């Protein structure tokens, strides 16, 4: 369907670099599918980023033969560059992209863009890691993909499941706001865009996809992995420094709570903190008893505390102190890790004293001493969380578009 007087609804960008073998068949397959299945107005843009083979010749011919196909060329290599250039010049309401090898089944395309066309969501991504996704690829790439997304979830505390599936869409107004803050122009482009979007309180819609690995893929997995790790460190630093204006984006585009949560009273905070602490203590004890035999007392203590610290901070943020939304989320998680280090210092010191007195202390004696030390660490944690990590900041409320809250509000 061609664009009507109502304007272009969807532009699908296909980034290419030296794809002369598959380009024509893929574009014609995509064009035929859209003619048959896409009711909204659409356009396909072949975004050539510095190809040196016959890609340009084939793409130019396709653009001349097919009325809804456009060819754009850049003289610089990088998928991020290609998407930034094509999306920046688009007049469509929704911007999408997919890999030229068509690894993702095109049947997922209508449900990918539907929530964006309706305004329900801000970004939509295909996921190869959903329970109902069907994926065919080698064990090496499967392991690398799952490891990368697991690392991303643990370090950046994101909720989306698959950062690098080449099958995504974004509302044009959202892209216009986010793209200036995305620095990467290579394979990390997708991950960086999604991290900023989630930190800004935007709604990311995921759909499970059927995906078949391209055996001719020329992606340098080792170099891509190294670049992605550098990108994670860079983005984390930018979030901590506040150089990415996620609070301002949240105020402009973010999805705020339907009913802004009130901040619990002091008594309510103590009660809720106790419940979270009780659950964390049980989790710590189970982890310690499981980790102590293979690792020893001190490493098991460190690992058990670390694994429970992130969940403890997240639970206290939302449940104990009534804070939701992305405002200062990453900073507060980092501060929570600082509090964790103080707790670890207390507990490891107690463990060291025990071993100095009784070198043959049993795991049950170690756990008893650690429980007592954790009680002291818990009191310190509550004070630091309340007065430092989650203290009321009127500026945060105003940026989030909420009325300033008093220091205490009613609450249980």
Image (spheres, helix red, strand yellow):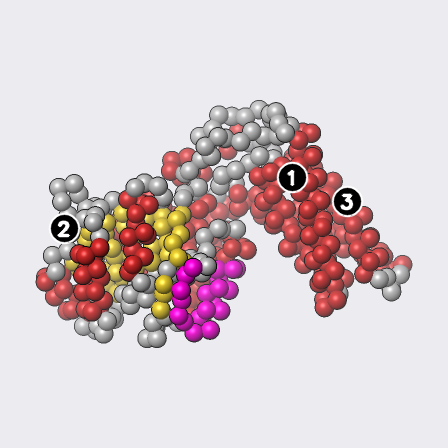
Q: Specify which label sits upstream in the sequence, 2 or 1.
A: 2
Mark 2 surroundings: few (<14), some (14-19) or many (≥20) residues within 10 A = some
Foreground: disc 3 or disc 1 = 3
Nearer the observer: mark 3 or 2; the answer is: 2
Q: Nearer the viewer, mark 2 or mark 1?
A: 2
Kindly identify which numbered label has been placed on residue 106: none
- 294 relative position to 242: left or right: right
Cα distance in 3D space between marks 3 and 2: 67 Å
Dot 2 and dot 1 residues touching (CB under 8 Å): no
Quote the CA–CA distance across marks 2 and 1.
56 Å
Residue beneath label 3, please?
A: 375
Element type at marker 3? helix
User: Does residue 70 sit above or below 179 in this rendering?
Assistant: below
Res 349 → quadrant: bottom right
Is residue 229 one of those drawn in magenta? no
163 versus 387 height, above or below: below
Q: Where is residue 185 in the image (x, y as percent from the top left)?
A: 35, 58
Task: Report whether 160 appears left or right of 8.
Answer: right
Horizontal side, residue 363 vs residue 277: left or right: right
To which residue does mark 2 refer? 2
Q: Does the magenta stretch include residue 135?
A: yes
Mark 3 vs mark 1, CA separation in Å: 15 Å
Magenta stretch, residue numbers: 132-151
Residue 77 occupies which quadrant of the picture? bottom left
- Where is residue 192? Give x, y as percent: 41, 53
Query: Could you say whether the residue bearing mark 2 is in a helix, strand or loop?
Result: loop
Q: Mark 1 points at which residue?
A: 385
Sequence-earlier tag: 3 or 1: 3
Please name the residue shown 81% across and 61% down the image: 363
Please give the name of the residue rendered at 36% of the width and 43% of the height, measured from the top-left corner. 121
Query: At 51% across and 55% down in the image, what residue appears?
Result: 153
Q: Which of marks 3 and 2 is nearer the N terminus?
A: 2
């Amino acid at each position: 369907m061609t664009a009507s007087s109502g304007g272009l609804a969807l532009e699908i960008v296909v980034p290419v670099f030296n794809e002369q073998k598959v380009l024509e068949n893929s574009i014609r397959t995509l064009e035929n599918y859209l003619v048959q299945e896409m009711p909204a107005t659409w356009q396909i843009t072949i975004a050539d980023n510095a190809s040196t083979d016959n890609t340009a010749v084939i793409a130019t011919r396709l653009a001349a033969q097919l009325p809804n196909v456009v060819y754009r060329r850049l003289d610089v290599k990088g998928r991020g560059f290609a998407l930034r250039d094509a999306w920046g010049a688009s007049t469509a309401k929704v911007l999408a992209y997919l890999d030229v090898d068509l690894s993702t089944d095109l049947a997922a395309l209508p449900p990918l863009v539907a929530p964006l066309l309706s305004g329900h969501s801000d970004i939509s991504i295909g996921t190869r890691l959903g329970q109902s996704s069907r994926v065919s690829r080698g064990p090496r790439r499967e392991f690398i993909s799952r490891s990368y997304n697991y690392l991303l979830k643990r370090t950046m505390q994101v909720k989306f499941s698959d950062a690098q599936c080449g099958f995504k869409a974004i509302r044009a107004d959202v892209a216009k706001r986010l793209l200036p803050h995305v620095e990467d122009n290579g394979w990390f482009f997708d991950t960086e865009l999604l991290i900023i979007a989630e930190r800004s309180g935007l709604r990311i819609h995921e759909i499970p996809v059927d995906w078949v690995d391209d055996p001719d893929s020329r992606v340098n997995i080792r170099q891509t992995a190294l670049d992605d790790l550098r990108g994670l460190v860079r983005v984390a630093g930018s979030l901590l420094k506040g150089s990415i204006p996620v609070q301002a984006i949240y105020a402009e585009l973010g999805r705020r709570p339907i009913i802004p949560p009130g901040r619990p009273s002091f008594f309510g905070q103590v009660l809720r903190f106790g419940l979270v602490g009780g659950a964390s203590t049980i989790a710590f004890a189970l982890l310690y008893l499981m980790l102590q035999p293979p690792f020893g007392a001190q490493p098991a203590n460190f690992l058990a505390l670390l694994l429970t610290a992130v969940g403890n901070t997240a639970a206290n943020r939302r449940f104990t102190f009534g804070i939701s939304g992305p405002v200062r989320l990453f900073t507060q998680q980092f501060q929570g890790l600082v509090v964790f280090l103080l707790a670890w210092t207390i507990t490891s010191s107690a463990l060291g004293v025990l071993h100095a007195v009784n070198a043959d202390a049993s795991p049950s004696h170690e756990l008893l001493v650690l429980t007592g030390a954790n009680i002291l660490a818990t009191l310190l944690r509550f004070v630091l969380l309340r007065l430092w990590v989650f203290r009321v900041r009127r500026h945060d409320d105003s940026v989030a578009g909420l009325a300033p809250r008093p220091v205490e509000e009613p609450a249980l």
